[in-house]
Amino acid sequence: MADTLSDYDPAERRSTPLAIRLCETMPPEGLPLADYMRVCLLDPEHGYYNRRSVLGRDGDFITAPEISQAFGELIGLWAAVTWRQMGAPSAFDLIELGPGRGTLMADALRAAHRVPGFTSAVNLHLVEASPRMRELQRETLADCGVALAWADTICDDAPHAGSARPAIILANEFLDCLPIDQVRWKRGTDGAFDWSVRHVSVDKAELIDIWVPLLDGDPHRPLLPSNPPECAIVEFAHTAPVIAAVAARATVAPLAALFIDYGYGAGSSATGASGDTLQAVRAHAYEHPLTAPGLADLSAHVDFAALARDVARHGLAVDGPATQAEFLGRLGIVERAAKLMASNPGKAAAIEAGIARLIAPGGMGTRFKALGIRSPDLTRLPGL
């Protein structure tokens, strides 16, 4: 059917409970990569986000809100300024997609509380599918001063007819966790080139990667480059339902959204091929995505150019993307850091190091991008 990836070291494989179950229940054609990612992250019994706390120095990775409180504070002030640009409605939905431990939202609400009327107008919605992460968010936000409501997906959080409120949506490192498809251009056994799609299968009771011929009628075909180099890989993220749900809300009430994630602004080459950006992280180290199913975080880089095109097709306005350094700089992160260091001189070095990490060239400052989405009649969003 296809070959296995050469960079997968069998000695690194771990027989996790999820790996064992996948090997026992694998269909003959294997699992599409997107389905494998979805199971690894959200399986009710053995999924990554249902097992334990995954964030922080004792977890597997650290996100911007965990690095510095200034990040969440600036996002909160961004939301407050955006709310004012909407006309300061007396009631609106503040929605966070993938809230992590709730750190960003806690810092954001603390900062935005200084803006008169903002907190009393908030209806807070957290879009989180993991019961374990919901527990952590409930603990972190216990004293935030607003009522909490959860939904499994943004589609589940759709407003009821006639009761729609203006909405501000925040999403930090959310899009990178959405499942992806990977399609590769390679010479087949008959000597002809064609596209194939990545699946996960089983060989001798071990998980392996395989590449299955792409069907002629597959919806990805019209979007593929016409003259790619051999072994070029194109990724397609499952962002369409998210953007469609955002656009649906914008048809009934004013909406503004902020997406921050690591990714790229255009295809990585003139051919439009993005390359293989799928990655697994466990204990702050990278490993092959098949090494420890259910024990490692799986994610992929965000194609912001494709995201912006999809948003525009739905009739929404797009601001950015800007690099994280540019975005936070325009919001005043340097000035905020100076105030934090002045009021906490004993922690000045740690505060400075955290801010430097967020805006470092070649690091988070440029690898991460910020993209704004808004109803067309709203003014350009702050910082973008």
Image (cartoon, grey):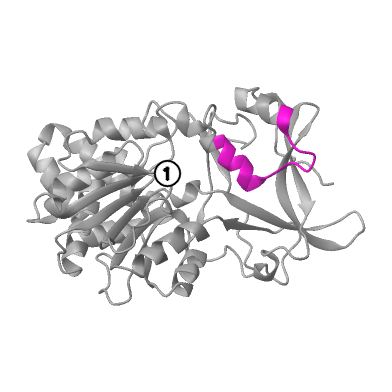
Does the stretch in magenta take in 38? yes
Q: Residue at x 21, y 39 (%)?
A: 351
Q: Residue furthest bottom?
A: 377
Residue numbers of the magenta segment = 24-40
Q: Where is residue 131 shown, x and y percent of the image?
A: 41, 32
- Amino acid on which disc 1 is placed: Asp
Q: Which residue carries the number 1 mark?
A: 152
Q: Residues within 10 Å of mark 1 (few under 14, many from 20)?
A: some
Relative vertical location of residue 201 with respect to residue 337 in this rendering, above or below: above
Q: Quadrant of residue 314?
A: bottom left
Q: Residue at x 73, y 71 (%)?
A: 227
Relative vertical location of residue 173 with respect to residue 229 in this rendering, above or below: above
- Mark 1 falls on what kind of element? loop
Relative horizontal placement of residue 144, taking residue 164 as reference (left or right):
left
Q: Where is residue 269 shown, x and y percent of the image?
A: 61, 65
Q: Residue furthest right?
A: 190
